[in-house]
Image: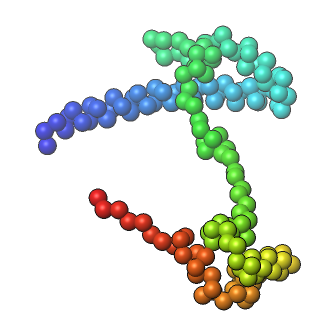
Amino acid sequence: MQGKGLIKLLVIVVSLACLYSLSFTWVTRKVEQDAENFAKGDLAKEKSYLDSMAGEVVYNLGFAKYTYREAKANELALGLDLKGGMNVTMEISLDELIRNLANNPKDEKFNKALEQAVAKSKTSQKRLSLYLWKNINPLELLPHFRHSFRQKTTLL
């Protein structure tokens, strides 16, 4: 267990560095919270409060003093996931997906069955695939989807 003291020292140094970096974020959040409380919902008032604090010392470490502007420049940048996130909804056209997986076949029977299935699924809660399988034998679809299910393997 040689080097155990070195590892402990390294953990302490890294922890202090992390706390130092985070401290700027905590200080700026506190100033911004004060601005919010002062403005009581008035965005112009909040912005003017923050502008007035830009040159004021808000963080004194004893050996270094930081204004709000400097603390804001040193704070950790939060990604979208930490700022409230972002929601994405993606809609997939199932009939287009089936056509693409089947390599856009020219087979009239397949296309007619798919069109009928799409029409029926729009007026019902049942899935498109259920109607498609009722209109055409699944074994007849195999040639269309053969390329989609083929696995490529490589040797290392």
- Residue 69 vs residue 114, the one in the foreground: 114
Residue at 57% from the left image edge and 31% from the top image edge: 77
Can the viewer see residue 128 in this picture? no
**Does the image show residue 17?**
yes
Q: Using the image, determine if residue 92 lies above or below residue 112.
A: above
Image location (x, y in percent) of residue 116: 81, 80
Residue 69 on image: x %, y %: 63, 16
Quadrant housing the C terminus:
bottom left
Q: Quadrant of residue 30?
A: top right
In the picture shown, does residue 126 fall above or below 100?
Answer: below
Tell whether 1 sits left or right of 109.
Answer: left
Foreground residue among 139 and 7: 139
All told, the count of numbered labels is: 0
Quarter of the image where the N terminus is located:
top left
In the foreground, 87 or 2: 87
Query: Up-down: is 139 above or below 74?
Result: below
Q: Position of residue 18 (x, y in %)?
A: 43, 31
Q: Position of residue 33 (x, y in %)?
A: 70, 30
Decide: is 154 above or below 19: below
Q: Residue at x 58, y 20 (%)?
A: 73
Residue 10 image-quadrant placement = top left
Residue at the spot x=42%, y=66% of the render? 152
Q: Quadrant of residue 84?
A: top right
**Horizontal placement of 155 versus 54: left or right?**
left
